[in-house]
Amino acid sequence: MDVKKSLERMLESAVVVSWADLMRSTQAGLVRIQYGFAAGGTLDYVQVWLSMTRGQWLLACAYWMSASKFHGMGIHFDNGYQSESLARILESLMQHQAAFSLPVDLGRQGLLQLSAPTPEESLAAATSVNEALSLVG
């Protein structure tokens, strides 16, 4: 029996793979990944927030499954951030959520926090992302 990869772990791996793009000239800092649920239990959105100075968070990007009068559908980068690899990976993950084990909807936003990855964590994240992308095509 093939066990599905966790979507939360895949979101973390996507950020780790794109760490250099997001952190620019520094490798230090924290990343917070927030996500919210749609009515059916899938993810409606993912936001990636960065902190390079204690207590200050900047929105790097957001991916929305549907548009509203406040935001468009798809990925949008903010505050001068840009990452082609993160855009491509988030697009694949969000459009193929059924291929992964979804987090449990506890009636609140989900939150993941990451610190600077080690070289081993970066390698593992790259392997995990490559496997996931080949899975969803």
Image (cartoon, rainbow, N blue to C red):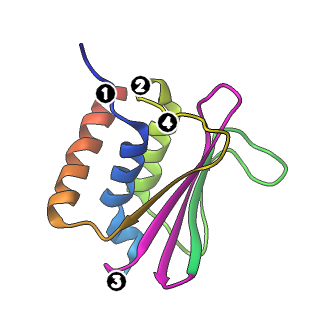
Asked if the residue at tag 2 contacts the one at tag 1, i.e. Cβ–Cβ closer than 8 Å, the answer is yes
Say which element carries label 4. loop
**Marked residue nearer the N-terminal end (4 or 1):** 4
Between marks 3 and 2, how big is the CA–CA gap?
A: 34 Å
Residue 26: assigned label = 3
Magenta region:
27-55
Q: What type is the residue that disc 4 sits on?
A: Pro
Task: Check residue 103 in the rendering and tell me which mark sits there, or answer none.
Answer: 4
Crowd rating for badge 1 (residues with CA inside 10 Å; few <14, some 14–19, many 20+) = few
Q: Nearer the viewer, residue 60 or 43?
A: 43
The C terminus: image quadrant: top left
| Among the two numbered marks 4 and 3 on one chain, the one whose residue lies closer to the N terminus | 3
Residue 106 position, x and y percent, is 61, 38
Label 1, on which residue? 135
Q: Measured from the top left, where is residue 96 in percent x and y? A: 47, 29
Left or right relative to 3: residue 54? right
Mark 1 vs mark 2: in front: 2
The answer to whether any part of residue 50 appears in the image is yes
Furthest residue in direction left, as rendered: 120
**Type of amino acid under label 2:** Ala
For badge 3, the amino acid type reads: Thr
**The quarter of the displayed image where residue 37 is located:** top right
Q: Position of residue 24 (x, y in %)?
A: 38, 78
Lower position in the chain sequence, tag 1 or tag 2: 2
Question: Would you name the residue on which mark 2 appears?
Answer: 99
Q: What element does badge 3 sit on?
A: loop
